[in-house]
Image: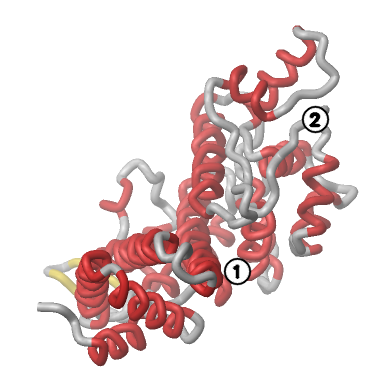
Amino acid sequence: MAMSSGSELVTAIRLFDKQERPLVGAALAAISDRTPDDAAVLRSLLRRLATINEMLDASASLRRDKQLALDVRNEKTLVDHLTRIDGLGGDLELPFKSTLSRTFLLAKIQFLRGLVKSTKCLESDDNDFAHLRHDLREELAQSIYTLLAEELLLALLRKPNVTRATKRRAANQLITIWDNAQLEIDDFSPILEAAWHARNKVSSKLGCLLGTTEYFRLVSENCPNQFLEFFCREEVSRSEGQAFEEFLFNMTYEELQILGDAMRAHGRDSIQPQWASEILGRKIEELDPSGEIDPMALYRSYYRRQLAADFRIMAGAEGPRRTAEAYMMIYVLDQDADDKTDPGLMDD
């Protein structure tokens, strides 16, 4: 049975924040009027999202004391557990509510992607839909950035070269996120959100692989000064500099080495994305000609760089052991901490 407009409004109020609600409502109304089949698919996704949210609401806070048989769980034991995981167990190492929370966020992302796709088909009928789709894409990006931040915090927990104090802060931040599925990245890491949004609006021209053009494009797209200054400070480490180069070019350290070697072998002073694609054997993603951001491209870029960093740790290979975002997240987590000392390793 189709969901009524009234029940859609109630559902939207429960599932989305105040910026998302009017956009979701307007998009569903427009799609229902013009493409009822699409609207039926989207309503089905919305119902599933509501079901997951109901399961989350019925789950106790992760900070509450609980006991199963002789196993006592509380906030302290959960934080201790999270700081010891190595990541090889995947979601099996995480509490069930965290899986529900992550599933809710993934389902929300899929729903918003569906809205973006459906409203794109309506743009030829009315230019107003172009504005609606733009705003929906921005909300989709924020949800993807939130997922990225969660993945980033989980990556810090499994890193052997991150202090226990920092891991405890990362664990506490994750528990807060998992306990409130409506929490988004602007609530806990606005610096990274702004940095990702700026990076998402810049295509790497490559050139001489100096990164000057990419850096000033980030400045022009309002990348936070705190983010840029962190990687340009006098005491920046070699690993931090390498990670920032990866961020600038949307490539791994290894890919940049391959391109540098190829430039010298071919006697080239500069390169273009098409030539780089041929050398690396993969497409170099560029900004859409319309100027619209593609948050999925940023997600792929982060994952490529994160996987490479994990491999370097396991293989003892050259290159940064963390992504640029990880260095920034650690700085943010530790910035306001009372205790700056810890017996763990401080750097890689």
User: Counting other residues with Cα less than 10 Å from the Cα at mark 2, is it few (<14), some (14-19), or many (20 or more)?
Assistant: some
Q: Position of residue 339 (x, y in %)?
A: 67, 69
Q: Earlier in the sequence, mark 2 or mark 1?
A: 1
Q: Is residue 310 above or below residue 276?
A: below
Quadrant of the rendering where the N terminus is positioned: bottom left
Look at mark 2 in the image and give the residue it sits on: 207
User: Counting other residues with Cα less than 10 Å from the Cα at mark 1, is it few (<14), some (14-19), or many (20 or more)?
Assistant: some
Rendered residue at 53%/46% (across/down): 297
| Camera-side residue of 122 and 13 | 122
Q: How many marks?
A: 2
Quadrant of the rendering where the C terminus is positioned: top right
Rendered residue at 54%/56% (across/down): 164
Kind of residue indicated by mark 1 = Ser
- Evaluate if marks 2 and 1 touch, with contact meaning CB atoms under 8 Å apart: no
| Camera-side residue of 45 and 251 | 45
Residue farthest toward the right in the current orientation of the protein: 234
| Eye-nearest disc, 2 or 1 | 2
Please identify the quarter of the rendering in which residue 107 is found: bottom left
- What colouring method underlies this structural image? secondary structure
Kind of residue indicated by mark 2 = Gly
Q: Is residue 283 above or below residue 39?
A: above
Look at mark 1 in the image and give the residue it sits on: 189
